[in-house]
Amino acid sequence: MKAVRFTAWKTFPTIEEVDRPTPGPGEVLLKIAGAGACHSDVAIFEQFDESMGTQLAPAYTLGHENAGWVEEVGAGVTGFTQGDAYLVYGPIGCGACPTCSRGQDTYCYNAATQPYLATGLGRDGGMAEYMTVPARNLVPLGDADPVDAAPLADAGLTPYHAIKNSLPKLAGGGKTALVIGLGGLGQLAVQILKAITGATVIATDMKPEAMAEAERSGAITVPGGDDQVAKIRALSGDQGVDAVFDFVGITPTIKLAQQVVRRQGRITVVGVAGGPTSWDFYTNPYEAELTNTYWGTIEELYEVAALYRAGQIKPSVKRYAMADALQAYHDLHDGKLSGRAVVMPHA
Ligand code: ZN
Ligand code: ZN
């Protein structure tokens, strides 16, 4: 079968012919409907090197946003029907520690001794005709389209987890949320905030077309500029924003968040750019929280799938055939995408 392989550090992926995998005990063989291309993949093959350790070390098949149809099951697996559509929860922890037991493999106690981080992140992912997945990582999609669903596995789940953790700040009338950065995750963040909170959603990005899309999802947009902080504060009744979500994570975006958050509000940095910021007693309003989040839980992926199946959220997707999979990564790298690139190995 064909697979998009990450073969060496600082090396662009290649499409190779590899053996179709066989599901081991407790695993399911999934026929891939769609595999999303993520900025993390670009970081992995462009920026990372040996210093990242062995868990992300090549070679393996990329793709950590996957959905597809059950093809075959391994020993001991029951309750699946061939052809049924599922979304894949990517992280794979030890499966037995307290955090894995609640479906939060991202924070596995034994992460340091696991052989990989996730499907497509050290273990063979979904940019291939088939992949194997532990059965517990599969979330049913019913009759919803698995191609458009693929990005939900990361670009949907990651903002959902951040928003869910901020819900106490957004409960009640007259609340405001700010989304900074309107790529794949930010656009879905706007949709999720509209679907599960009553908050006024404010959004900002450098790209006018990204802001136009957020407006179509119900956000009020504020462009960058000298009066950006004043405009955002005015939209939040001059008291500041209850919950800020920064999907960029560079110093200026975190600083913007610190300038607009209200007293007792909350800033969640989701973007992995790693920009430093300063914090001391006087930099943030009283009791404003500054935190980060990483991906989400299996339970939350069920909730994301429920929103999708109900038509309340819908990723904006650009579809690529397997033969054009490398073009998808070029387009992502060159900033040419507005929606999420999804590769369809069987189209
Ligand atoms: Zn990702
Ligand atoms: Zn664990």
Image (cartoon, rainbow, N blue to C red):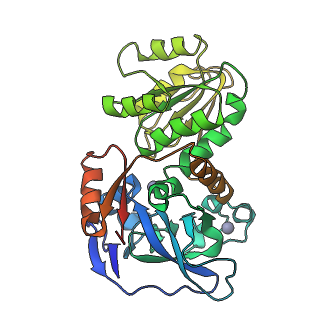
| The quadrant where residue 35 appears | bottom left
**Drawn side of residue 18 relative to residue 295, left or right:** left
Nearest to the observer: residue 115 or residue 207: 207
Residue 124: x and y in percent read 44, 75
**Drawn side of residue 42 relative to residue 291, left or right:** left
Residue at 47% from the left image edge and 44% from the top image edge: 185
Nearest to the observer: residue 247 or residue 284: 247
| The quadrant where residue 27 appears | bottom right
Residue at 69% from the left image edge and 86% from the top image edge: 76
Count of labels shown? Answer: 0
Nearest to the observer: residue 189 or residue 45: 189
Q: Residue furthest front?
A: 143
Question: In this rendering, does residue 174 appear at all?
Answer: yes
**Drawn side of residue 198 relative to residue 17, left or right:** right
Q: Is residue 109 above or below residue 208?
A: below
Residue 57: x and y in percent read 40, 71
| The C terminus lies in quadrant | bottom left
Q: Is residue 49 above or below residue 257?
A: below
Residue at 36% from the left image edge and 70% from the top image edge: 345
Residue at 60% from the left image edge and 86% from the top image edge: 74
Residue 196: x and y in percent read 65, 37
Q: Is residue 75 above or below residue 234?
A: below
Question: In this rendering, does residue 93 appear at all?
Answer: no
Answer with the quadrant where ligand 1 appears in the image. Answer: bottom left
Nearest to the observer: residue 333 or residue 187: 187
Residue 334: x and y in percent read 24, 48
| The N terminus lies in quadrant | bottom left
| The quadrant where residue 248 appears | top left
